[in-house]
């Protein structure tokens, strides 16, 4: 099945470069291009892409607002792709419903894999972004939060899968680690998302680091 992609960037040369990279992959296809945030919203409604690559600084409507409108009105998943590695953009993009945040210096193979990952229902962040995001949410809360003692609410198997997701493992890697099928691992993750009312894997990571289980979580190697 071909993954349909919309590329939104106000710089024609950058947009052409992204389109050229995506078109080298046999399982990906660019169905539309947009030079403004408003056009990206309109073309998402018209072309129904699976994934939208969204720049942040664009005329007419910025990428954050466009992401919010797209994620609320369609099933398209958004990967924010920007030159600016700023915390405010990361948090705004995630609040708007983005499933990923990458920098424009991301290598072409990593960009293609990111599109596939997001299209499959997972979420991802650039490594440098992940480290800061984790650092922010790992700070001890001033008082108890809804995430306190989170792991105590899970079964032994759910707890194991939860910590592996927090460790950045994909469904296939979780399956290998637990000696189960990829389908079983995917089911476990889906149960976690439902039970904890989490939007995606990034939300699970945040929950993990806001829970009061530092001894187990500090062993994680962040590879998202």
Image (cartoon, rainbow, N blue to C red):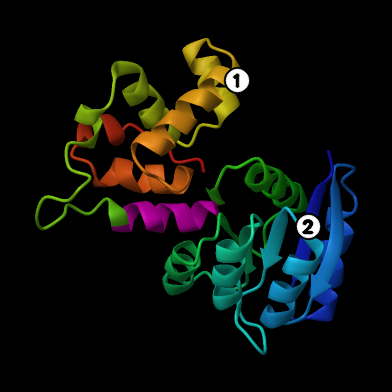
Q: Is residue 127 magenta?
A: yes
Q: Is residue 166 visible?
A: no
Q: Residues within 10 Å of mark 1 (few under 14, many from 20)?
A: some
Instruction: Residue lying at the far bottom in this picture: please name it.
Output: 60
Residue in front for this viewpoint, 148 or 134? 148
Whole-number angstrom distance, CA of label 2 to CA of label 1 = 26 Å
Instruction: Specify whether residue 89 is in view.
Output: yes
Q: Position of residue 140 (x, y in %)?
A: 17, 52
Looking at the rendered structure, the secondary structure element under dot 1 is helix
Chain part drawn in magenta: 125-136
> In x, y percent, where is residue 142?
10, 58
- The answer to whether 173 is drawn above or below residue 30 in the figure is above
**Disc with the residue nearer the chain's start (2 vs 1):** 2
Q: Residue at x 77, y 53 (%)?
A: 108
- Outermost residue to the top: 179
* Image vertical order of residue 57 relative to residue 47, above or below: below
Indicate yes or no whether the magenta region holds residue 162: no
Task: Find disc 1 in the rendering and name its residue.
Answer: 182
In percent of the image, x 63 and y 47: which residue is there?
118
Total numbered badges shown on the rendered structure: 2
- Which SS class for mark 2? strand
Q: Is residue 88 left or right of residue 123?
A: left
Residue at 31%, 40% (x, y): give it. 208
Residue identified by numbered label 2 = 5
Query: Of residues 196 and 14, which is closer to you in this image?
Result: 196
Q: Main secondary structure of the magenta part?
A: helix
Label 2: few (<14), some (14–19) or many (≥20) C-alpha neighbours in 10 Å: many
User: Could you tell me residue 7's position as x and y percent?
Assistant: 77, 66
């Amino acid at each position: 099945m071909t993954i349909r992609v919309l590329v939104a960037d106000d710089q024609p040369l950058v947009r052409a470069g992204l389109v050229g990279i995506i078109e080298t992959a046999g399982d990906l296809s660019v169905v539309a291009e947009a030079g403004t945030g408003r056009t990206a919203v309109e073309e998402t409604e018209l072309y129904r892409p699976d994934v939208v690559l969204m720049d942040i600084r664009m005329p007419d409507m910025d990428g954050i607002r466009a992401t919010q409108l797209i994620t609320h009105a369609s099933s398209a998943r958004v990967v924010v792709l920007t030159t600016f590695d700023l915390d405010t953009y990361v948090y705004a993009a995630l609040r708007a419903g983005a499933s990923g945040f990458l920098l424009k210096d991301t290598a072409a193979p990593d960009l293609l894999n990111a599109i596939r990952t997001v299209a499959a229902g997972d979420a991802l962040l650039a490594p440098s972004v992940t480290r800061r995001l984790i650092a922010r949410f790992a700070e001890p809360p001033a008082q108890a939060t809804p995430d306190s003692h989170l792991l105590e609410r899970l079964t032994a198997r759910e707890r194991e899968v939860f910590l592996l997701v927090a460790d950045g493992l994909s469904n296939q890697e979780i399956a290998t680690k637990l000696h189960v099928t990829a389908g079983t691992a995917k089911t476990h993750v889906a149960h976690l998302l439902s039970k904890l009312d989490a939007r995606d894997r990034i939300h699970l990571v945040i929950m993990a680091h806001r829970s009061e289980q530092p001894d187990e979580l500090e062993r994680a190697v962040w590879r998202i």
